[in-house]
Image: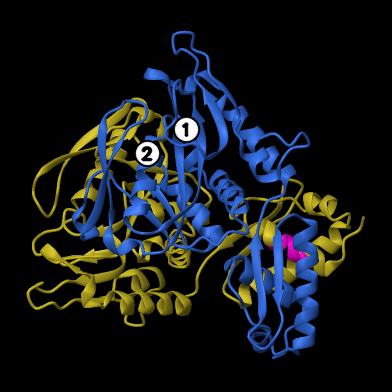
Chain colours: A yellow, B blue
Amino acid sequence: MKVKRSNRVVDMTRYLLERPRTLISLKFFAQRYDSAKSSISEDLGILKQTFQERGTGILETIPGATGGVRFIPYILREEAQEFIDSIVDEVNDESRLLPGGYVYLSDLLSRPDILRQVGRLIATQYLNQDVNVVMTVATKGIPIAQSVANYLNVPFVIVRNDSHITEGSTVSVNYVSGSSKRIEKMELSRRSLQQGARVLVVDDFMKGGGTLNGMASLIKEFDATLIGMTVFAEGEFSGDRLVKQYTSLIKVNAVNPNDQTIEAQPGNYLSTVFGTEMGNK
Amino acid sequence: MKVKRSNRVVDMTRYLLERPRTLISLKFFAQRYDSAKSSISEDLGILKQTFQERGTGILETIPGATGGVRFIPYILREEAQEFIDSIVDEVNDESRLLPGGYVYLSDLLSRPDILRQVGRLIATQYLNQDVNVVMTVATKGIPIAQSVANYLNVPFVIVRNDSHITEGSTVSVNYVSGSSKRIEKMELSRRSLQQGARVLVVDDFMKGGGTLNGMASLIKEFDATLIGMTVFAEGEFSGDRLVKQYTSLIKVNAVNPNDQTIEAQPGNYLSTVFGTEMGNK
């Protein structure tokens, strides 16, 4: 039975949002709604316009017999900035201070509304890059990796510090923890990463960059390619970081826990992704 | 500027899908689209009808001054069964067999398309229950917890076997691993769970039920309430399980790894959630 336009566009919106970056043919929609391809084309024009006006994402149309339509989610600078500012506000709270200058962030990284936006922000950064897989290290990077993977519609892999029987054979590397200078080990299931894969690395927190650097070595071990590294928060670090190129959503300076002061501010995300008027990074 | 109906319903669909179980007032939409409340009401009728026809979820309307509309995602039996059957097919693959009768499942639980459906299925099971928080244990339960939490729009908490400095003070319990009979310890950050919280427990795999049982003890320790336990897969186990009431999406019988045979089948999810003609579980 022929489906009406208003019902079609509701269902198409849902269908495309649930399948980011997936090419859907016009024929598929035409059959699904028992409607002419020309009507479907008009519907998609409405979606495209609305998504653009509301900053939801791009609706990319690929012409030809093998063509179709693909939804690519993004976030606009203004919304990204608003979100980062709201996170900075939440983190600027002395009750988050933990012994040793650490900061409690687990509550933020377990809220679906926050994780969704973090995923959208990071996916926007790599909008025009070909990413096959998102990598992170257990435990607290996982929710971020999953959310980014959701928006890029690619799988994610979890590097672990302990090997686990249900992972099968693994590849491991030793790495130097940037903050403690200790030698540690991380490993990844051999099956989980293909040779030549294009890998985006994400994590919750970076201090000296040792963990990120370890993941970079692991990517080399698998003959895969590192596309970029983005963390939710970077902490204060005196000395040389082991990783030079990274992006952070926020920056946390936990000044001397004896003073019980904490100071968070936006990281380099906005200038890296959207640039600045002054052109500085 | 007044927004046209077709554009309104596209944006409303997106807005509501991104905020499951959140009450949105008609006034909010009326202002957002510079349209009369009566038009918004009609729009919502279109969404409601489409969501119902396509098995997307319920659009609940709450009348009155404090009322509005709330989207509650669910999955219909037919789609749930199709999904479970497709997972069973994927798991029935001898190359997944690991030493000790374990099964490699990590690739499935790192694919966004699979995790989305797992989340929808488990959220549907607890559709009419008041759940405040989803709990799981690190590492492989996390993606499931996050996806369920996303559909229920509640936070999730991660129980760990090792304490970590960035978690602050923790509460720990000892538990007996159901399969190895060893005493282990698990802990949860004190700040992450409120007294009286209504907790849904999820995990990737269950054998003897020791880990699930440990989480049940931890929930008691926090004076919180256990609402239910659902796992992605249950394995074969000879002997008494430590947990009697649980739901599983699939069942994996890894018969003697020497034979190199694996046998997966649907778990008790469908009969638990949708019932059966014969009324058996």
Measured from the top left, where is residue B55 in percent x and y? 74, 54
Front in this rendered view, residue B67 or B35:
B67
Screen quadrant of the N terminus of chain B = bottom right
Measured from the top left, where is residue A63 in percent x and y? 72, 55
For residue A162, side relative to residue A47 (left or right): left
Q: Which mark is residue B211?
A: 2
* Residue found at the very far right of the displayed protein: A1
Residue shown at 42%/19% (left/top)?
Answer: B101
Q: How many marks?
A: 2
Extent of the magenta region: A9-13
Mark closer to the observer (2, 1): 2
Q: What residue is disc 1 on?
A: B105
Q: Which mark is residue A227?
A: none
The amino acid type found where label 1 is placed reads Leu
For residue B169, side relative to residue B65 (left or right): left
- Identify the subunit bearing mark 2: B
| SS label for mark 2 | helix
Q: Quadrant of residue A260?
A: bottom left
Residue shown at 9%/78% (left/top)?
Answer: A259
Residue shown at 29%/71% (left/top)?
Answer: A267
Measured from the top left, where is residue B36 in percent x and y? 76, 90
| As drawn, A18 above or below B70 | above
Graded by Cα atoms within 10 Å as few (under 14), some (14 to 19) or many (20 or more), the crowding at tag 1 reads some
Front in this rendered view, residue B102 or A140:
B102
| SS label for mark 1 | loop
Measured from the top left, where is residue B102 in percent x and y? 42, 24
* Residue found at the very far top of the displayed protein: B259
Can residue A141 be seen at all in this image of the molecule?
no
| As drawn, B207 above or below A22 | above
Graded by Cα atoms within 10 Å as few (under 14), some (14 to 19) or many (20 or more), the crowding at tag 2 reads many
Q: Is residue B153 magenta?
A: no
